[in-house]
Image (cartoon, rainbow, N blue to C red):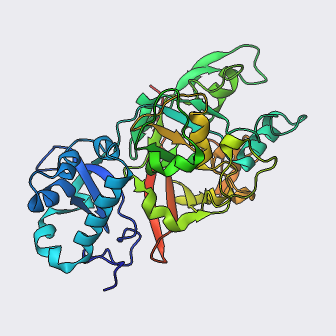
Amino acid sequence: MTLSTSWVDGAAGSLFDLDNLPYGVFSTRDDGARRVGVRIGDHVLDLATVAEVGDPASALAAVWRTPSLNAFMAMGPEQWTVARDWITEVLRDELHAERTSPHLHRLDAVELHLPIEIGDYVDFYASLQHASNVGRMFRPDQEPLLPNWKHLPVGYHGRSGTVVPSGTDIVRPCGQRKAPTEDSPTFGPSRRLDIEAELGFVVGVGSTLGQRVGTDAFADHTFGVVGLNDWSARDIQAWEYVPLGPFLGKSFATSISHWVTPLAALDAAWTDLPGQDPEPLDYLRVERRSGLDIEVEVLLNDIVVSRPPYSSMYWSPAQMLAHTTANGASVRTGDLWGSGTISGGEPEQRGSFLELSWGGAEPFTVFGVERSFLEDGDTVTLRYTAPGTSGGRIALGEVTGRVLPAT
C-alpha cells in the first residue's frame, strides 16, 4: 500500500481515493440526524463519531455534527488543512481500521442532502466560446461579444432559495413567452427548457463589507467546488431579460452536487488560462496558472452528448471572486457562485442544448432521434473529473435532475 491509497475496500485507485476526500451531508435510515461526512470509495465516513473516539470534546467533531458544512467551512483554511491531514491519516493507516470501520456507511445505505446553507448565489458568464455562440445566435448582424465582456467577468445575482441538491426533480417552469413570430406574449410552460453545465465555487470564509478580496486571496476564502446545472427557460429568458437581465427564466431551479470537493484536492488541476486580451485591470490580474483542468460530460438520458472542457474558460475563479467584491460587497460563508456555461471550441464541447442545437435550428441526434430542448421525462446528468495529486484522476460530485411536466 502506498501513501496515496486507503485501506477501505474498493477505494484504492478509485476516483474517490485519498487524493479526493470530498465533503457532504448525510443521514442514515436508523438515524435521521443530518451530519457531515467525507466520501472514500463507495463509502461515507461519519466524521464526528470517529473524531470523538480520540477527543470527545473535539471542536471539529462539534461542527461535523451540524446539518451543513457551514460551521466547518467558517473555521478557515488552517482548520481545513488540519482536518484533511487527520482524515487522510485515519483512512490510510490500517492501524485505524478497527476503530474506524464501524463508522463507515455504504453510499447505497445513506441519504445525501444539500451540503451547504446557501447565502447569496451569483452566476457568471465566463466562457468566451459560450458567450460568442450566444452572441452569434441572437445578434447575427453585430459583434458576438458586447464591449464590456473582455474587461470584466459578467454575472447576475440568482435566487439562492431554489438551489437544490442533485437528484431533485425539476418541474418545467411557466412564464411569459413571446416568439419572434408572435404578436403578443402568452403565459404557459416553457417550450425551450435547457441546461447549463457549470462549476460552482463555495465561499468558506466571508469578507468584511467595504473591503475587496484580491485575486491572490482566492484560497483564503474559497472552500471548494461543486458540480452545478443552471437550468434555463430560454423562451422566458429571451422575453424578460431586456433591460435588466435574467430573472424568472433562471430562478426556478439550480442543481448542485451532494459533494463539495475541497480546493486541496485540485492542487494538480491548476493550469494556464487560455490568454486574456486586453490585459485586465490591476484588480483582476492573476498568475497565468489560474485556470482549472476539469473535464465535464453532459449526459441526456444516460447518453453522453457533450464534453465541455473547463480549461477553456476565459475568466478564472479568482477573478470572479475579486470582481464580486470589487465594489466593497461582502461575501459570507455558504455563498455560491457559478462559472457560467462551460463550452469549448468544438461543436461537441458545447455546454448547453441551446448551443448544441444552435437555437433549435440544427437539432443534434441521440440514438437516431433529433433533439433540441428538454422534453418532459428527460434526465440530465453532469459528470466531472480532474487530475489528482497522486497522478491519476479524481471525480467531482455529479449532478442529475429529471424534468417533470409543468403544474
Picture residue at 22% right of the left edge, 47% below the top = 35
Q: Is residue 154 above or below residue 10?
A: above
Quarter of the image where the C terminus is located: top left
Picture residue at 91% right of the left edge, 34% below the top = 141
- Drawn side of residue 205 relative to residue 91, left or right: right
Q: Position of residue 166 (x, y in %)?
A: 40, 46
Q: Is residue 93 visible?
A: yes
For this orientation, the residue located farthest to the top is 184
Q: Is residue 309 visible?
A: no
Q: Position of residue 100 (x, y in %)?
A: 15, 68
Picture residue at 70% right of the left edge, 50% below the top = 314
Specify the quadrant of the image occupied by residue 151. top right
- Drawn side of residue 190 relative to residue 86, left or right: right
Decide which of 400, 67 is in the foreground and name it. 67
- Drawn side of residue 90 relative to residue 182, left or right: left
For this orientation, the residue located farthest to the right is 141
Picture residue at 15% right of the left edge, 52% below the top = 58
Decide which of 334, 318 is in the foreground and name it. 318
Decide which of 190, 342 is in the foreground and name it. 342
Q: Position of residue 84 (x, y in %)?
A: 32, 62
Q: Position of residue 373 (x, y in %)?
A: 63, 41
Quarter of the image where the N terminus is located: bottom left
Decide which of 325, 387 is in the foreground and name it. 325
Specify the quadrant of the image occupied by residue 67. top left
Q: How many marks?
A: 0
